[in-house]
Amino acid sequence: MDLQILLLLGQDGLTNGAIYALLALALVLVFAVTRVIFLPQGEFVAYGALTLAALQAGKLPGTVWLAVGLGVAVVLIDGGLALKSGNLKRLPRIILGNLGLPLVLLGLISGLEAEALSALALPLQILLTLGIVVPLGPLLYRLVFQPIASATPLVLLIVAVALHMTLIGLGLVFFGAEGFRTQPFSDGAVEIGPLLVQHQTLWILFASVALIALLYVLFERTIYGKALRATALNRTGARLMGISTTMAGKLSMGLAAFIGALSGVLVSPMTTLYYDSGFLIGLKGFVGAIIGGLASYPVAALGAVLVGLLESYSSFYASAFKEVIVFTLIIPVLLWRSLTSHHVEEEEE
Amino acid sequence: MMPKTFAPAHAILAVFLLFLAGGPLWLPEFHITLLNYIGLYGLVALGLVLLTGVGGLTSFGQAAFVGLGAYTTAYLTTAHGLSPWLTLVIGLGLTLVFALFLGFITLRLSGHFLPLGTIAWGISLYFLFGNLEWLGGHTGMTGIPAVAIFGLELKDGRSFFYLIWLVLLGAMLTTRNLLDSREGRAIRALKGGSVMAEAMGVNTARSKILIFTVAALYACVSGWLYAHLQRFVNPTPFSINQGVEFLFMAVIGGVGHVWGAVVGAGLITVLKQWLQDFLPELLGQSGNFEVIVFGLMMIFVLHRARNGLWPAIARFVPAPPQERHAVTTAEPLPRRQLPAAGTVLLQAEGVTKRFGGLVANKDMALTVKAGEVMALIGPNGAGKSTMFNCISGVNPPTDGHISFLGQPVAGLEARQVARLGMSRTFQHVRLLSSMTVLENVAIGAHLRGQKNYLAAGLRLERQEEARLLAEAARQIERVGLAEHMFDAAGSLALGKQRIVEIARALAADPCLLLLDEPAAGLRYLEKQALAELLGRLRSEGMGILLVEHDMDFVMGLADRVVVMEFGEKLAEGLPEEIQKNPAVLEAYLGGVE
């Protein structure tokens, strides 16, 4: 291997690692706030990428229907509860909050001709994509996790896996079995030393760093970010201080959906994504998160970058075994954690 | 054990067994195939019942263990011509090694690391099967020989049917036996949190690794059967998705009961068959859409009926009357030699416990002698329960020296301290609410039995089991709860649950008893009965360390009293001295201005 290949693989690994790092952050966030090990995180990646691809092909993506359907379900449940308690004033908020955006987007996209849709400026297409996929996070939290918010982590994990399977199946219904790529944000490449770096690579690195900075500001400087941190530290205490754990759950999953969809949008010009590609991508974010013990954001992010690099270099040496190598990485990590933790951790039923 | 009465449940079981026995004689080929798969999947789901429903753990990688069993026999029988029976043993050995390793690295960590570890394991093994040339890659391996029993070759599904279902029914029986035993109670105690189980002497890490290994071995046998039924293997049936499907079977069928595995496997297998025809037609494209239905079903079950289908089915069948065997007739267990009255049992010096910056105990000292009641009192938050946890090894002290029977106990695990003859109750009751009082108390006697899980699975420990239950029953009678012996522990009033905790502690045959607020929630007469019991234990030579808030109770019973405030010792002496001590009065009642 010469320097050229070494650098090229490093660039590849770093790009993928940046995406895994974003996903790892989302996973740590959701786990800390809701205790859900959010395996469906990867589906947001696939949904984001494939929704954008559908828009660029001038088609109405099925995810819009999913958002509308989930919105209707939430409105029926929450609206029913509001009616039962005679709290009619809350109805407009429930309807607008859960169904407003999906319906507007449905109207907007189906109102456009196929050619007009595919000719839309890329930033607008991305905005539409995020507008479709991000609401799925809070809506799914409301329907799937909120009713069992106090269940054990084990039950929550099994539900998360069930949701993952459902979303994969729906992805196949929406997008079919073939894979898609989207147009790059900008064509071309820049020469950095001996390397030719694609613009899209720079976009990914830039977006990841910007997003991480944004998350930092959110958690350190805003009241909602602080509410999330408080919920993560102590749910009961946060609730006593007037923080709604439901709000925190919806917010964290909304963020997870945003991070997932954006990751999908970012990688889809570089890799062909299929309806089920999200799972492995999300899991690699997971390996990073596990390296961080599902608790530390910086270690999780670093772990994810390490996963990206390892994947990239192993794809050069033993490409058939790259998944095996990446997923076996967690064994030494777990071994080390197991040997350094002394007391049996308590878990209540 | 033969049922003494013939209940409808037994009749239904008999009909089911007859149906299985006669099935291959008249059922069409397609139904035989379905039933074969239900049996194979049921065996894997059975392992998950043990792991998830009983032990509170889970695995998404069971399909990989199935694959391990299938590929081991496929490779060794085709490439090296080994006998399938030999490859079964080799497969089980390999599974054992992998399961023990995975268990060892994940089960000491908190609960979610095992499922995550199994996902990684499942994916790795799947890609390994698909990419190793000598395992046939993605196309797989053909020409796996048929299994022969006593020269009879099981060449078709019809004859293989009997082998599959005999193995499954055998595994179900063994699993049920295991759960209804000393080891089984230790496994069922896992769901109540490890602190109580460890304090009763259960090695919870070992119990967890045990059920994970058993579940993996069941999966491996299923894989071996699969390979010799199909006579062909490829990686697809061993993917992570199949691993998740096994979990769906167990959860939807009813993860708390061995029959739930069979019901779940049956339902999912039949439903999948139907959905795979119906859904693609409905949606106008081909693909595995049944996962949508399964996923939604699973979410619904976990929202609304966490115990799955089996309890709903079982409700229609009157349960056979609960066996209330005459538990007290068995030969008593050997007892510990109690130290002579006055011997120092427990000596704590300079015990300090810090939680970060908070000092919960500072330089605490106390002794307990055989045949005395030592009371530890103090206002709320004085650090009494922390001191208890330091002494019993639940949460070892940061600093200081604690010795029990002259032996230092610092650094020992709670279960090792328990083995030395110290037994405790908890301030916040830690009983397994769905288990009977008898079973709960029998957990206390865990360390007094030796027979392992193999003996339990094969029912070779019935004599010891009877003695353990008899001991538990004796302790329940001793504390005056005989009429509640077969009630679910959770149905008792809180005060009585505390008494059950005392019976459980006594079942360990301790020489030092640690009681954390035993009288809280008791009525006057119950308190008198408790005081009488503790007085009797004292006169038998037991040492008792008591934390209690009821001053009448303490002052009437205790031989000596230690008062704590803000983590430190405020006073020590006879009850009369303590009642007059000005510092104690100030701490309890506030100073006189």
Image: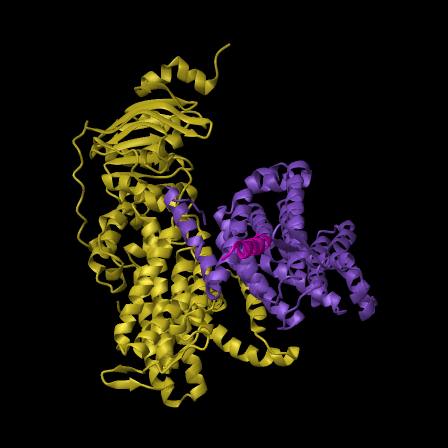
Chain colours: A purple, B yellow
Residue B345 point in image, percent of width and height: 23, 30
Q: Is residue B200 magenta?
A: no
Residue A131 point in image, percent of width and height: 73, 57
Q: Is residue B167 above or below residue B251?
A: below
Residue B417 sits in quarter? top left
For the image shown, how many numbered marks are present on the structure? 0
User: Magenta region's main secondary structure?
Assistant: helix
Residue B490 point in image, percent of width and height: 42, 49
| Residue at screen point 55% across, 52% down | A36
B482, B59: nearer the viewer: B59
Q: Is residue A2 magenta?
A: yes
In this picture, residue B403 sits left or right of residue B552? left
Residue B51 sits in quarter? bottom left
In this picture, residue B559 sits left or right of residue A241? left
| Residue at screen point 56% across, 59% down | A281
In this picture, residue B243 sits left or right of residue A126? left
Residue B5 visible in image: no
A59, A324: nearer the viewer: A324
Q: Is residue B171 above or below residue A327?
A: below
Boundaries of the magenta span: A1-16
Residue A306 point in image, percent of width and height: 51, 50
Residue B206 visible in image: yes
